Amino acid sequence: MKEYFLEELLQIKNGRDHKHLPDGNIPVFGSGGLMRYVDQAIYNDESILLPRKGTLSNIQYANKPFWTVDTIYYTIINKEKANPLYLYHYLKQLDLSYLNSGTGVPSMTFGVYYSVKVKLPSLSEQQKIAKVLSDLDAKIELNNKINIELEAMAKTLYDYWFVQFDFPDANGKPYKTSGGKMVWNEELKREIPEGWGVKELSDIANIIMGQSPPGESYNEEGLGTVFYQGCTDFGNRFPTIRKYTTSPTRFAKQGDILLSVRAPVGTMNIAKENCCIGRGLASLNSKDNCIAYLFGVMVNLKQIFDRRNVDGTTFGSITKDDLFSLNVLKPSNTVLLEFDKIVNPCFQKQNKLEEENIQLSSLRDWLLPMLMNGQVSVGEVESDYEKRKRKLNEFAEKFKTKNNSNSDLELVAKEYQIKEEVLGMVAEPDTESKPERIRKARSEKSDAFLKKVMLGSHLIYSFYQEREFGHVKFMKLLYLCEQVAEMDLITNYKKAAAGPFDKKTLISIENYVMKSGWFNINKECYTGFNGKVYERTFYTLTNKSTDYLKYFDKFFELEKPKIEKLIQLFRGINSKKCEIVATTFYAWNELIKNNALVNDASLVKGFFDFHPQKGKNFKEVDVKNELPWMRENRVYPLIF
């Protein structure tokens, strides 16, 4: 690794105004992202776009001609020293917000950026790593393109059947075009097929209007239920989990349509899990079990909302009564079921591909720091990846030949079912549901994730019978095991209200053990030691629960005595004590690292400085009472 100042690797250039430029196909970027398209470029080569004002964390990468406005810099990169894509990913890993030089709106200067220090491997190694990351991004983009095509085809079929009324008649011919009988409908002010009717939206859909829980119940530590406030949480198809609530009010079920009921009204996502929804959302599911048709209805309604917005009638929100009473077409059951039979496989495949993209992104983000600091080599990632790429490209070529005819839609739906195994390979990380690969992961470079999973599995197996064993105690014990056994499991514990907490590690462990079939994960409500009602997670065994043990014993041959000693110490210990001990341990460690005085007073102060919530949930005596226990049982840094 060689250290550089950023000034040695790139030259920063100012963006310029774009308003005078005619529309075209060249993207215009600001600090918030893509703004519009114009007919000329400010720069034609690869570039890293560095925010000047506004959202300073939104570093962007461009590999095609582009234009930038004055809120974002573009760069000319010295390709003899730095691979542009590698450098982009490196800078994205850094938290540069502390360099903010603005007094009001966040802002950055040339000089501040130029002073950033960067450590780079050789150019050839950068290029290898950049290729792996680029290929992962290409897979995500391929899935996105397929999903766009699937959505366009579903919309085409919906319009063909339910707007133009050319669904197949009894002879397989287009109904209206072939002279099918039409009758006037006064409510819609148009003709509709005979036997069809008009219903209110609430007649065909179960609708739940969101309600925001108390603000003090919100947290980012994974306590309680996933909470989505509004469409600001929306992604391409599924929302992004940002918050949880310990006092959920209104719920959406997994697979429900999530509808924005505040501006922009009509924007939609799909619930990836059971969740709580705030007042900016409503959830819908089909009373006829035809979710693909209901989704098409809502897409059609959104077009109406959008047209009204264009006409100047802005929808700030839509009320419950207005939403429930929206007039919608009710086709015959025969046509409805036939439509769902064709489109639902594509609808479900869209969900699957988006889930795969989430897993691919997670895999990329997990690999990124490990590749950049040398913990995983490119060779370990590349070979299996190229096989997947070849199979996906073969399928993509076949997909490109499809058009939007009705017969081809049916063929695509069937082909997606046939190709499920191939597509499923995209997002199948080397460590998921593949125990045989655990045996291959011998090197210290690639073991960290698997070690976390096996240690987490052992804690679940050791404590699953205790009612107190939920997310709080789980994460505190995982943290303490890593510390007292002096392991580096590449965790990232944040200063959360409940003590050291690494949400990504928790989610990855739970996802792994569920997919492996080792444990069941359940939820229930309980009253905490502070008197508040929380939703806790608890674990139950399966017939595969002991499968992890052979891997645990191999991974932790040296550390196992310390881990087992810690487990015995914490049997029957409530989550309150676990939180106190883990947080105090963290504070103790910080004092040692900073060569500060360690005594009861400094430990108590470190505990309450850890997070503002500590002062609300604990008293000074609570912490002091645990210090003798920690010393007696040697639960403190460096010595155990």
Image (tube, rainbow, N blue to C red):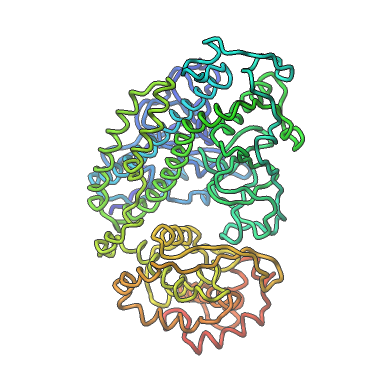
Query: Where is the N terminus found, in terms of image quarters?
Result: bottom left
Query: Residue 65 versus residue 158: which sits nearer the camera?
Result: 158
Q: Is residue 564 visible?
A: yes
479 horizontally vs 544: left or right? right
Taking the spot 32% from the left edge, 31% from the top edge, the residue there is 396
Q: Is residue 317 visible?
A: no
Taking the spot 38% from the left edge, 67% from the top edge, the residue there is 544
567 horizontally vs 55: left or right? left
Q: How many marks?
A: 0
Judge whether 224 appears above or below 175 on screen: below
**Which of the 4 quarters of the picture holds residue 622?**
bottom right
Where residue 7 sits in the image (x, y, percent)?
Answer: 38, 42
Residue positioned most to the bottom: 632
Query: Where is the C terminus found, in terms of image quarters?
Result: bottom left
Taking the spot 54% from the left edge, 76% from the top edge, the residue there is 466
Judge whether 273 appears above or below 175 on screen: below
Judge whether 629 appears above or below 459 on screen: below
Judge whether 197 appears above or below 77 on screen: above
Where residue 611 sits in the image (x, y, percent)?
Answer: 61, 66
Query: Residue 319 versus residue 117: which sits nearer the camera?
Result: 319
**Which of the 4 quarters of the picture holds residue 200?**
top right
Residue positioned most to the front: 170
Query: Residue 32 versus residue 574: which sits nearer the camera?
Result: 574
Where residue 60 sits in the image (x, y, percent)?
Answer: 44, 38
Where residue 104 sits in the image (x, y, percent)?
Answer: 63, 43
Query: Residue 513 versus residue 235: which sits nearer the camera?
Result: 513
